[in-house]
Every structure is written in structure tokens, then in C-alpha cells.
Image (tube, rainbow, N blue to C red):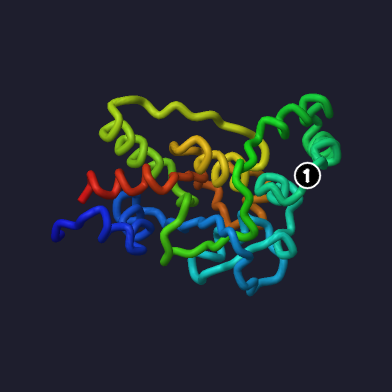
Amino acid sequence: MPSMSNKELQLNQICKRLSQISASTWVAIKFEKQIPANDIEPVRFCEAVYKAQNKRISLSLPNVYCDGARRCFGWLKNNDAKLAQRLSEKTGIGQDVACELIRSVPVPNEKFSGISLSKDIDGDVYISYASPESAMKLVRCWQKMTGRNLDTEISGIMFVCGNVAVKSHIDQKISISFGCPDSRKYGGIEKEQLVIGIPHNVALRICVINI
């Protein structure tokens, strides 16, 4: 393969290169300051990630179906108690514990009005529904790049939206989730897949060292 500069690689090539490296499909997630044109009926964020493997999707508050995702993106405030009650009823987790878990899910510091998802754009975060083997390849890339093991937290709530998309963006490192029953039912995550998120600068470095 011909040599490629960082600038050239950034031109909508990262999803493609990550796919070549990991043998899984990647979608770029771009947090937008202005509301993009909405083109789909209300969906869960995990479902939008899956649909964006085949077409570009734009999201804003009205067409994000899930209150958990709305909360993670900073579009639904002061609703943690209600979310905790739903989580408690659904999982059997005590409501106080559920509330603490929800409060631990990060919310972006900066405000944004919409989200673009596509395989053909540069993103703030890149997400894949990948096999354990693909995850292994990326962890080895991380070790090669940093000389360290990947230190990550695994959460059981708000899997794709908060603990992958937002967390990867804020922490600037790889995030991993096992998904949840709803995301596997509606979001297209297969039984043998997990969810991986990589922030742009880390993804770019992985791509460059593997050219």
C-alpha cells in the first residue's frame, strides 16, 4: 500500500482503515454544533449506529427515541431519578444503586445540537459492533502504540451512547461494552459481538502505525 500522510488519512479514510485492521465495520460519530437535517423516524442511538453502516444518518433531540441516550448527549436534564426507577424495575437493581450507576455515565462538557453518523465522514468517535477477535487486534494496536495494557471500565447501562460514544470522546481512549438486551434487540448487535469505541486522535494513530 502506498505511504499516506496524517492529513491524507484524515480525509474520510479512518473507517475504511479501521475495517482493514480489525476486520469489522466502523461508523464515524460526529457531534455537531448545529442541528443537521433529520432524515429518519425516531430511533434508539444504538439502532442508528447499525443503520449508518449502510447510509448517512443525522440525529437531534426529536428523533432520538431513547431517554437514556438523550440524557447521555446532554439533551435531557434532571431526569436521573425517573431513569433509575425504570432501570430498577427492568433489572431488579435497587433504585439507589441504579441512580448512582446512571450518575456515573458521562455527559459531554460542550454543548452540541445534533449527531451525524456515517462510514464516509471523519468523526469525533468511531464505533464498531465487532467480534472478540477484532477487539483483540485493536487492543494489540493500543499496546503497540502506547506500550501499556488497555485500562477500561465495563458498565451495564447506557452501553452504546454513554459508555462508548460519549466516554470515548471525553476520556480519549478506547471504550468497550457488551451491549444490553435492548441494544441487541433493536440495535443490530449480534450474539457474538461487543461494542468498541475509539476517539478520533487514537483511531488516527492506530491507522498511521498500521500503514
85 vs 199: above or below? above
Q: Position of residue 36 (x, y in %)?
A: 60, 68
| Secondary structure at numbered mark 1 | loop
Q: Residue at x 59, y 39 (%)?
A: 163
Q: Quadrant of residue 64?
A: bottom right
| Residue at mark 1 | 77
Which quadrant of the structure image shows residue 77? top right
Query: How many numbered marks, from 0 up?
Result: 1
Residue drawn at x 74%, y 59% is 65
Choose between 15 and 50: the one closer to the eye: 15
Label 1 crowd (10 A; few <14 / some 14-19 / many >=20): few
- The picture places residue 81, in percent across and down from the top left corner, at 84, 36
Position of 4 with respect to 113 (left or right) is: left
Residue 42: image x %, image y %?
Answer: 72, 65
Amino acid type for the residue under numbered disc 1: Lys
Q: Quadrant of the N terminus?
A: bottom left
Q: Position of residue 25 (x, y in %)?
A: 42, 57
Q: Nearer the viewer, residue 112 or 134?
A: 112
Residue at (36%, 63%) from the top-left corner? 12
Q: Is residue 130 left or right of residue 17?
A: right
Residue under the point 37% across and 42% down: 202
Q: In the current view of this chain or complex, which residue is farthest to the left?
A: 2
Vertical arrangement, residue 165 with respect to residue 157, above or below: below
Please state if 157 lies on the left or on the right of 123 as rendered.
right
